[in-house]
Amino acid sequence: MSTDETTAATMATTATAPEDSPFRPDPGARDQARQFVLPLVVRIERTAPPARTDALEASARAVLVLLGDERSSGGGEWAQAVRDWQDARIRKVVRRARGAEWRRAEALPGITVTGETAEVRVFPPVPVDDWPRDLARLQVSGTDLDDPEPPAGPDPGLPVLWLSPGLDMSAGKAMAQAGHGAQLAWWELPDEHRTAWRDAGFPLAVRTADPAHWRELTSAGLPLVRDAGFTEIAPGSCTVVADHPALRRGRS
């Protein structure tokens, strides 16, 4: 394993499938399976970096777009890789690219999702120790971004991925966590709500909850991301609550 690949494995952020998910429910079996990672690359040009919140939202949508793509299910060309990834720990690694690096990443099989300022490309899962060369050489650390001004409150009725107010995460770490939250929501939604969300283009918002709201969210029975603690935060930290209206109605 190269130095870059070792860094990627270390910087991976992981969430766990719920016990009633269609994927491998036994934590021991997940750990014994070959580990895969979902690569995400955010475009960060020196002169025009994306806004932080826009990058987080694009990252979450990118995960959903890949999960909802016909190539990721049934006999699709990415389906086996997606199954292998979801049967193990659902690791995600966010890397950054600019200029020629970004153009090389765009040439690899994947999907680019754009926001108002952000471009994020998601790739089919790869073994954690066998990254494509043009992705393995990209940097993981230093992926930090700012919002030019605080984001407005989310539109009513919009699915929201709420970040914990008590954790200080880099933009790259938060992008992966938002992707985890989106994925847990996708797993729990009934098929008709998945289809409606996909057909609408996966609208969503990512916001940081205030402490009182966070306490309410974490006790509402909504999908909750608990990080494995590979980097930045302690193992078991609650990072994101996925507040999709269809899931909240099902718990009311």
Image (cartoon, rainbow, N blue to C red):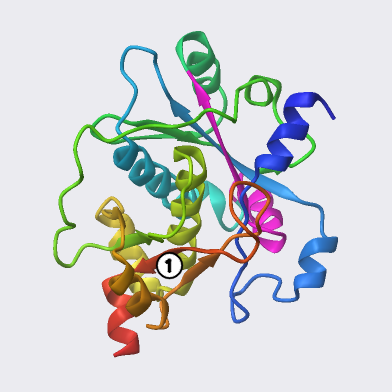
Question: From the viewer's perspective, is residue 75 above or below residue 27?
Answer: above
Question: From the viewer's perspective, is residue 17 above or below residue 38?
Answer: below
**Nearer-the-camera pick, 251 or 104:** 251
In the image, farthest residue toward the bottom? 252
For residue 86: magenta? yes
Quadrant including the N terminus: top right
Q: Is residue 135 left or right of residue 114?
A: right
> What residue do we see at 28% from left, 50% from top?
201
> What residue do we see at 43% from left, 67% from top?
185
Residue 26, image quadrant: bottom right
> What residue do we see at 79% from left, 37% from top?
129
Q: Position of residue 57 (x, y in %)?
A: 34, 46
Quadrant including the C terminus: bottom left
Q: Position of residue 202 (x, y in %)?
A: 31, 54
Residue 22, image quadrant: bottom right
**Nearer-the-camera pick, 189 or 204:** 204
> What residue do we see at 29% from left, 55% from top?
207
Amino acid type, label 1 = Ala
Write the start and end of the magenta stretch as one range: 76-97
Q: Which residue is mark 1?
A: 185
Q: Is residue 210 left or right of residue 68?
A: left
For residue 161: magenta? no
Q: Is residue 85 left or right of residue 185?
A: right
